[in-house]
Amino acid sequence: MGVRTTALRATAALGVAVLLASCGSGGNDTGEQTGGALEGRGEITFATGKDTSNNMQKLVDEWNASHPNEQVRIIELPESADAQRQQMVQNAQVKSDAYTILNLDVVWTAEFAANRWVVELPTDQLGLDKFLEPAVKTAQYRDKLYAVPVYSDGGLLYYRKDLLDAAGVKPPKTWAELIAACQAVKPAQPAIGCYAGQFEKYEGLTVNFDEAVHSAGGDVVDASGKPVVDSPEAKAGLDALVTAFQQGVIPQKAITYKEEEGRRAFQAGELVFHRQWPYQWNLAGKTDGSSQVAGKFDVAPLPGIDGPGSSTLGGHNFAISAFGKNKATAVDFIKFFSGEAAQRSNLLATSQAPTLASLYDDAELIKQFPYLPMLKASILSAKPRPQAVKYGDVTQAIQEAAYAALTGEKTSEVALKELQAKLQELVK
Amino acid sequence: MTVVARRARGATSGAGRLAVALLSPTFVVLALVVGYPLVAALRESVFREGTDLDESGFVVEGARFVGVDNYASVFAGESAVRFWNAFSNTTVFTVITVSLEVVIGVGMALVMHHALCWRGVVRASILVPWAVPTAVSALLWRWIFQADGVANSIIGQQVLWTTEGWQAKFAIILADVWKTAPFVGLLVLAGLQIIPNDVYEAARVDGASPWRQFWRITLPLVKPALLVAVLFRVLDALRMFDLPYVLIGPRKASAETLSMLAFEEAASLRFGPAAAYATLLFVYVAVTALVFVRLLGADVIGAARERAAKR
């Protein structure tokens, strides 16, 4: 079952004859896959999703100017996360050296590490104590480090400050307070929806379901990786969402919301509360007429059942492909890209959450991004999604169960019991 | 006609050898681009990737030969429910969309054929949907069908089109008919253009009504072209993937088709089961095509020959 068979397998399954060409590129089977030696200097490539702000290119140009013999080239992959993962996986399966550094979503770490597609990294050389701890955890698999966190992400509760102020209520800390706040706002705003998150059947639903479960004190998988989702706490968390849908606290149409649909609704002034990532801050604050709520909103930590809630961790980590050449250069480049100067410029250009703790306390940056302290708190108390080798199957099972419960097709009890059984099968 | 063809085929052996020589590049290309992937997929479908972890948490590599296990598991337990649901979705979509497309497509062809003025504009505008890539048109329709979209403001109600239920099926059927009826129209138009005018003149002299002309002359004479169009559409619709995937989304029981099952498996790196799904779909498509050609006499090559002979 060598290089060729694997390539052929990919080809056959997809039925794409074009892929035949990739057999040729999978040349070197040195078999070197261990993390020990990160040697070799020279040109490398950096495979990543779309560089929307062009800041990646700017940073790479900066690096290239000072490293004439260790040039880095960006390879832009498709915009959708699934397509990015597929390309990286296909490359790994034919053991191609086309990608040196991989920009991995935090949930892919386990799969890439367990398949030996990325190499273990030397923890002591990377100064990880300066990073936010939950972000570093997403880069580990079985307590070993396989990537360096470069972007993080945490959910925030966006709320309409103007409406809450007018009704004389404070931003809610618990789910019950949130519902009470909506009722206080309702008399003045009869048509407004109370709350929305991401509830369409996709990765965002996994994120929102995990948050509901964690915020109620439950867990999807426990610290040792065992599924524990049929607990009363998990049920309480899911029930909070189910009841909210039934009672209209969450508008019916929110079942079709991904990030962007929800953002449009919030910006059109249709929602009092919206669970969303930090990227909405700049867009909803635009005063060019695209947002009706500019200057009228603020953010708070996510609410929980009894106390503050807990966000799901997002973000991206940089890993080194096991099949890439010039790994020493790759380590240096990752150090450069995750360093303070680069992360600061990334935050300024893209408003993506950094992973270095110091940037969240920087007065200059807080002036420009007032939500930073809130975001830091969100990330520090955030929980990762299940770190499973078969993460794709795990997230599908979660979406299946959550969607069935939210649409009333199954009771939350049945949905969670079935999910527990499926997860036990998948996380063995 | 067949007699003539047969006689021509059995000419001298020298001509036969020349024919083999001339055709062999075609066969080589066909073997490479059709035969090879087919055989590779079949071979693939009897293997399964290792997914077990060793003690330190690494995946044990290598694929095992599992015989018909991948096929058997398609028809066992939960995946059987999913498979038959996708099978019936695929069949329902195919039957309904192709029927609607035939009716609308013939209508479009008649309009394009008889348009007296602005002929170019009429034809071009009818063909626009066909020119739009499917994924792009699916995005357009998703925009139309979203909660605050055009569709809901037209009917004045809030229907959540992309959620589970009949409305998701309806959305797919509407979008597919919009996109591919012009294709049927185009092929039927080609058929209409070769019907000689004197047939209609004779009918008019005999006092046949336009309705009768349509049923007795137009339809029978355009039938070969129409059948080819229907055959192509059926084969196409059975493979439907991008439209439901983009418009409704993956893993929704109301919209899942057989192609989507194969795709989902492949995306989860289970290439063996994915190949099994793909093979089953291939068999379904092949059987449908065969039945279609046998029963309805859709003569793909013959229609072209007839047309050439008429000129």
Image: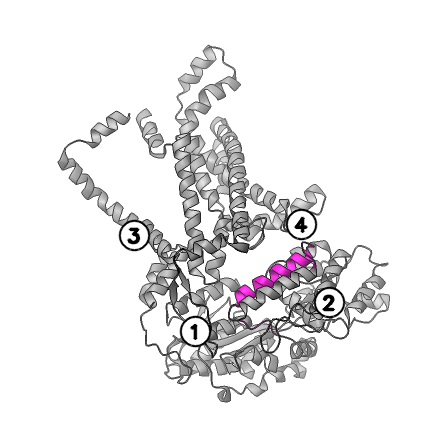
C-alpha span from label 3 to label 4: 46 Å
The local secondary structure at tag 1 comes to loop
Question: Quick check: B82 above or below A378?
Answer: above
Task: Pinpoint the chain carrying mark 2.
Answer: A
Kind of residue at badge 1: Trp
Q: Which residue is mark 3?
A: B32
Kind of residue at badge 2: Ala
Q: Which residue is mark 2?
A: A236
Q: Nearer the viewer, residue A44 or A317?
A: A317
**Pointer 4 local density, CA inside 10 Å: few below 14, some 14–19, many at least 20:** many
Q: Which residue is mark 1?
A: A117
Tag 3 and tag 4, C-beta contact below 8 Å = no
Quadrant of residue B9 in the image? Answer: top left
Q: Which residue is mark 4?
A: B160
The local secondary structure at tag 3 comes to helix
Question: Quick check: A72 above or below B216?
Answer: below
Q: Is residue A390 magenta?
A: yes
Provide residue A168's location: percent of width, then percent of height: 86, 69
Q: Residue at x 66, y 84 (%)?
A: A361
